[in-house]
Amino acid sequence: MPEVMLAAQSPLESVSAFTARDISIREEAGFTLTQVAGFGKAFERPLAAAVGKLPAKVGALQVNEAFTVFRTGPQQFWCVGDVPPQGLPGECLVTPLTSSRCRIRVEGALARRLLARAAAIDFDARSFKPGHFAMTGIHHTPVLIHCVGDNAFHIYAMRTFALAVWEWLVDAGEGMVA
Amino acid sequence: MTAFKRLDTGGRIDRSRTLTFTYDGQRLFGQVGDTLASALLANGKMVVGRSFKYHRPRGFLSAGIEEANGLFTIGEGNRAEPNIPGTMVPLVDGLVARSQNAWPSPAFDLMAVNSLAAPLFGAGFYYKTFMGPFKKSWMFYEPFIRKAAGMGKADAAKDGARHDVEYGFCDVLVVGSGPAGLAAALAAGRAGAKVILAEQDAEPGGSLLSESGDTLERWRAATLAELQALANVTLLVRATAQGIYDGNQVVVSQHLANGQLLHVVRARTIILATGALERPLVFSNNDRPGVMLASALRSYLNRFALAPAARAVIATNNDSAYATAFALAEAGVAVTIAEERAVPAGDLLAQAAALGIAIFPNAGIADTLGGNTLKAVRLKGRHSVTIECDVLAMSGGWNPAVHLTSHGGIRPRYDEAIAAFVPGGFADGQFGAGAMLGHFGLLAAVRDGEGAARSALTRCGISKMPAAVEPPAVRDDRAYGIAVAADPFAVTVPGKAFVDFQHDVTAKDIKVAHQEGYHSVEHLKRYTTLGMATDQGKTSNVNALAMMAALRGLTPAEAGTTTFRPPFSPLTVGALAGRSVGRHFRPTRRSPLHDWNAKNGCTFIEAGPWMRAWYYDWAGATPQEAYVKEMELVRKGVGLADVSTLGKIDVQGPDAAEFLNRVYVNGFAKLPVGKARYGVMLNDDGLVLDDGTTSRISDTQFYMTTTTAQAGEVMSWLEYLLQCHWTDLKVHVSSLTDEWGGMAVSGPDSRKALQLAFPDAEVSTEALPYMGVKDISFGGTTVRILRLSFSGELAYEVHCPANFVTALWEHILKAAAPLGIKPYGLEALASLRIEKGHVAGLELDHRNSLDDLGLGKMAAKEKPYIGKELRLRENMQAPERWSLVGLELMEPEKKLRGGSILFAATDEIKGHGRGYITSVTWSTELGKFIALGLYNGGLRHEGEEITAAFPLKNEQVKLKIVSPHFIDKEGARLHA
């Protein structure tokens, strides 16, 4: 049997990007998400060696050269990069989560208002700045929203709910530009 | 008859832009700047509705949100919305409006015959008349009553409007954009606070819009311009604050062109600048079209350039109505004032005299004359003269709009000086300003607004104080001057003197309610329906409460007021639902194989939030046909089923084994790496929470699976235990339900299928025995093969990261095609497990113990586990508990139904029986219907014949109690 390579498939393969004046919604795939947890400070040192500086507080993130590191809990980090962190010792409890999330990019002058119609978070430019993230809910499902530019956001949605969240966001977008 | 004329100059309308609209099918014209109400008045439509009970002709009472009479259905088809006050609808080109509660038209309404029976319709009419003579009389009468009396009708069609919800956050929310609100917003905005200013009108300005003269308009325009230039200020128009909730959360509904937007605003502080609403006077026939509030007439004149055709009478008990009189006189209208007070203020008398206005002191209105329109009024008092007029404007004083302050439970306080209720206080972070505090006057409003803003800024911790807000250059406010002692609330009025216009409640009704013992203001409201309906008594409450107080010999303060609750004005269900309708009502959860299934003949079924593969068309066109074939495939060959919906949890850490050992009833501490074990966990009541298999991946890592239905609950339960009970355990749990997908490869040929699909992997029974687990590297990812069986056949589950599940599924189908492998769905999956006697969600309903389900033997005796002590309670071990049994149908020509109630053969078929059927299927192996059920005493009755009753279809069938393991009791197939 010739060697088989399994092709990755996104749950959003059946949809097209939504683009309108001042708002666009599209999938931004091609990332690797790795959760690393541990106990005390013992796991943070080798993790920092692998991914760079770690954010000090829960709810903060650190953009390093190869990884964006979200502190999602007191002893838990999400590391987003092109590849998983390498060389982590046993103190680091590693859980690959790349398949578990879809990354949706919402961008444009209306992006903040669109998100205000999706989650009960203050998305005002003075409050939710580039480099901020929030773990919240959209359409009754858990999401992580990361502000990646003045009016640009990544939404990490659960894979199994991704299409429902996508349709919810696009519906909101259509309502705003109708 | 035309009672109003459009003036050639003045007003806020744009005479160069004419709009066309339709009213009851008639094409009419208005101007940009009109409301529907002003446009109808300009077109001579004085009668715009019929009253609720008596079908009396009604015209506009007000020019604002308090409108009680002029309600319309706006829009057509699926965009039609009933009960909209015409005073709040900005006129737009093509607007379609229909009158309500009248047939064929408001001007000629055949239902006016109701008024002949008016004596019957008094207070408590419904209670007295329609509750007998029989027990269900009300149910009989209700449809007729609703047809004869009522308001508009909602269309049954799906709402064509697009509503949404938007969350907002601010330092200062200002409600109302009159002079107080504008000043407050400007002061807060200048200080850099994030401000939201919500105005219910289409244009900001509040009472300023209804005043004449350039001075005020210049101030309004300059203030607005500065506000609009501030990036930190958001102005919302047609936006009504409907309710204030805990934590200063305010719901503001905003009308947009294509629907409503519900703003859910979390405000650090709230400034209520909601103004005041004018009260009507109560006199005979005070509801005749052409009788309106004095403030409304001032609005129609100054804002909409509409003046009475020739003559107007003003009836008042306070100074505020004089501004209307003076403006009318200046517009050339002949004005007479019927003044309830004996001596009005001297400066007003002088100004009136200069404008040629006749004043009758000590002379309220005795009655009005006319038909569908007003012809004349008869004054009461010693003058007793009749005065011809086109319009009668009345002012009984002003009610501060205190509604929002009461939503948190603070009751209003009666202020004798203004004969009205004022806020009884403010919740933390809330402030009032202007007329809503009972401070009537323009300069007072501006001062209040600025002061409230400073208080709000301090509360927000904003130390920068703004520059002072310059008030408009007008002379100082004059006194309000209401005649508090002049008995403005007389209850001895003859004829129909309306207190509540919208619900046709008269002064006499209040008297009757008092006579019949309904003294409390809450009882008065319910007995007469006063203050109910769409206007919620905005114009009627205080008059009615004061009347009842007078009848009881109390002051209004002693009588109290009813409770104001949200919403402030009617909200549609559509606005509340927003976009959470149709497919967006709740999120749909889809397996990684959803797209493949959708393209390959799968019929889906909803299972909780999931869309699961129910059956495939290769096996049949109906589920009944298909699942039997799919079962046969698995029993005789090999099938492939999507099991990605199973809950999957990563359990990691040095104490992971100890943790699982405490969670499950059976032992997990010594589970070897590379092995899986079936486990059952109890909740802390000792009842079964869930079951599943957990595999040991390494010394410190386990891969737990749960049922689809309980995945979330189990995850929360594990987190709770770790965070609250066993904080000393070093364990992390993470949901993998979305990360990993899986498929069951089931049937006697399943090993061959795996060998074809993974030729390099060793899957022999020696290398991968029953309950063995191994990870292999395949196709660029990790594939986890677990030798488990839900069907009772030789079977495996193959899991991998969800991104690759579809490719892996297609690969197995292709590789094992020579074996005839095909997909099978949930119906077959669930039926196969019934034949094997495996419990699932229908049996694991949080009411059954381990022993009820026949699993007691698997519990460890020595080690502790969650629920152990309570599981062993005497009652939980009672022999008569409903326990798991297998059931076989004894009457082959009949059908067995899930949910049937079980009775002993000799029982009367009545009540809850001795148990019920949880799961039922056709058994392909046994050729008969079989079932699982719970039965009193369980398998102690094995071999007995019993009866299953299905009362919904009046069916009864004979069954036999058997072991729940219908096939392969020894497990030979599993271990093949």
Image: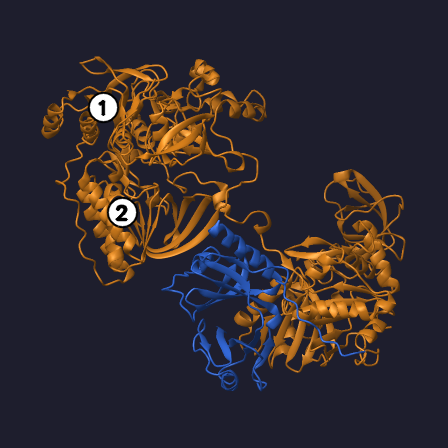
Q: Quick check: B424 above or below B832?
A: above
- Do the residues at pointers 1 and 2 share their chain? yes
Q: Quick check: B333 above or below B830?
A: above
- Mark 2 Cα-neighbour bin, 10 Å: few <14, some 14–19, many ≥20: many
Q: Which mark is residue A134?
A: none
Label 2 amino acid?
Gly
Q: Secondary structure at mark 1?
A: strand
Quickly name the residue at label 1. Answer: B314
Which chain is rendered orange in the image? B
Q: Indicate the chain on which mark 2 is placed.
A: B
Say whether residue B870 is left or right of residue B148: right
First reached walking from the N terminus: tag 1 or tag 2 = 2
Q: Secondary structure at mark 2?
A: helix
Residue A96's spot in the image, x, y percent?
60, 75
Q: In this rendering, does residue B627 appear at all? A: yes
Which chain is rendered blue in the image? A
Q: Which mark is residue B181?
A: 2
Q: Indicate the chain on which mark 1 is placed.
A: B
In whole angstroms, how far apart are the C-alphas of marks 1 and 2? 29 Å
